[in-house]
Amino acid sequence: MTQENHHAHGRDPGPQPHQAQEAGGAADSVRVPGTAVVTGAGSGIGRAVALTLADAGWTVVLAGRHRETLEQTAQLAGGAATRCVPTDVTDPAAVTALFEAVGEREGRLDLLFNNAGTFGPAVPLEELSFEEWRGVVDVNLHGAFLCAQGAFRLMRDQRPRGGRIINNGSISAHTPRPGSIAYTATKHAVTGLTKSLSLDGRPYDIACGQIDIGNAATEMTAAMSQGVPQANGSRAPEPTMNAEDVARTVLHMASLPLEANVQFATVLATKMPYIGRG
């Protein structure tokens, strides 16, 4: 069910990832790379984050619906330790199998980048079908919950216990775009998921944060340069930023010791219409 791109299983684990590696005192402590799961790793932000983590020394389990795109990400990682696990995050059995496989093969889980998501059709509210609404909710909310739950169980029970979950929110977790009710509703819900995970994770040394991203240049934002609907009824092109800028922010969040947490981070194209939107 999996493909390896380097020997992730049976490797010398080195220092335990939960331990701080001191570089001149507690204020300078950093987290030793361990094992990460990245969902939606076959494209866009998920791919950028997976490659950045792998380059920094993390063992990265690549999860997503399509094996071929996961394998492309693994190839781009070169000789870094990656493993492809095709997973539909809307399927509880598939998500359970993913995290069971991580526990059996890697021995522990130190990071989940809970990234898989879909925008859904950009149509007026009155034209959105229930099936289209449910499709967005299934991926963005149900999928995020299932993956967070699977990671939480591993992190709670492993020894040494603990780990970090980083949820991919959005600028739409704060302010909507026109014709985006399903996406906006689910991203607001992800913020509630993040807060609850942070609270419920405290007894088990599980930290949870959220990165809210605005206009990273990916397949999902390709239309930005051609013009997208604005709150005043016009259409206008919007600036984008490089997805690698997002990936470096996730790496920073992941590199903190578990005693510290970036609860919410907003990373956006500097000139995108967010401040003052609407």
Image (tube, rainbow, N blue to C red):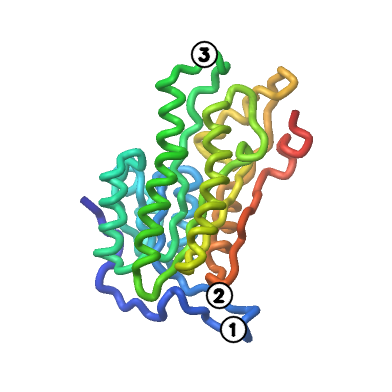
Q: Secondary structure at mark 3?
A: helix
Disc marking residue 240: none
Q: Amino acid at mark 3?
A: Glu
- Contact between labelled residues 1 and 2, with CB atoms less than 8 Å apart: yes
Disc marking residue 23: 1
Q: Residues within 10 Å of mark 1 (few under 14, many from 20)?
A: few
Q: Residue furthest right?
A: 276
Q: Secondary structure at mark 1?
A: loop
Q: Residue at left 63%, top 44%?
A: 241
Q: Position of residue 177 (x, y in %)?
A: 64, 28
Q: Which residue is mark 2?
A: 30
Along the horizontal axis of the image, is 274 left or right of 64? right
Disc marking residue 127: 3
| Residue 216 makes an appearance in the image | yes
Image quadrant where one finds the C terminus: top right
**Camera-side mark, 1 or 3:** 3
Q: Residue at left 74%, top 32%?
A: 277
- 266 or 203: nearer the eye? 203
Residue 199's image quarter?
Answer: bottom right
Q: Position of residue 101 (x, y in %)?
A: 26, 58
Q: Amino acid at mark 2?
A: Val
Q: Position of residue 115 (x, y in %)?
A: 47, 47
Cα separation, mark 2 vs mark 3, equals 49 Å
